[in-house]
Amino acid sequence: MKQFMIKLAMIAAMIAVPTVAHAEHSVGFAAGSTRGLGATYRVLPDHGAESPWGWQVTGLPLVSRDEGVVSAGAGALYLLHRGEVAMAYASLGAAALVSWNNCKENTDEFCKDESHWGLGVGPGIGFELRVVDNLGWSIEIPLALMFADGDFHGLYPVPNSSLVYHW
């Protein structure tokens, strides 16, 4: 699982990082099956850039002494068209969710030591609307292969959405 995520991140970095010379940067919040949940950072090519490739990473750790949830996601974005107030793009993304509970104190009789993980990976198509000058809202429909705790759970069109400030 970890090796797969590392390989996917390396492929996305090799595609996106060297090709985006002039870029638009964005920060905000994202949620979705192939995008992850939490704070997000995105790089897209500027108008007139040579390459149509960009990328986005998302993550959120919620960790306490005995339990936690960590969400992380990464995606490669291919800009299909950019207009004055909207743009269309295709993507390939992956997101993982890991949760655990370690019952250190036996004060709760219903507590069980456990850990779970989930993974969503797949291609998608989406668009972004520029709500105001530097604020964008995007929605994307991927075809996500969903896995949980080592088992395949299906192929689902679970949407991704982001609200970002860009410069």
Image (cartoon, helix red, strand yellow):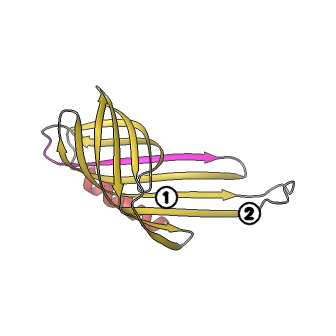
Q: Position of residue 148 (x, y in %)?
A: 54, 67
Judging by the rendered image, the residue that carries numbered circle 1 is 96
Q: Name the residue at the front extreme.
A: 157
Q: Which mark is drawn over residue 87?
A: none
Give x and y (percent) for residue 125.
28, 54
Inspect the image, locate mark 1, and give the three-letter code of the amino acid beneath it.
Ala
Camera-side residue: 118 or 1?
Answer: 118
User: What residue is rendered at 74% in x and 63% in y?
Assistant: 113
Which residue is found at the position 22% from the left and 45% from the top?
20
Task: Please provide the residue range marked out in magenta.
Answer: 49-63
Quadrant in the picture for residue 29:
top left
Q: Earlier in the sequence, mark 1 or mark 2?
A: 1
Q: Is residue 31 left or right of residue 89?
A: right
Identify the residue at image location x=26%, y=42%: 44
Residue 130, quarter of the rendered image = top left
Where disc 2 sits, the SS reads loop
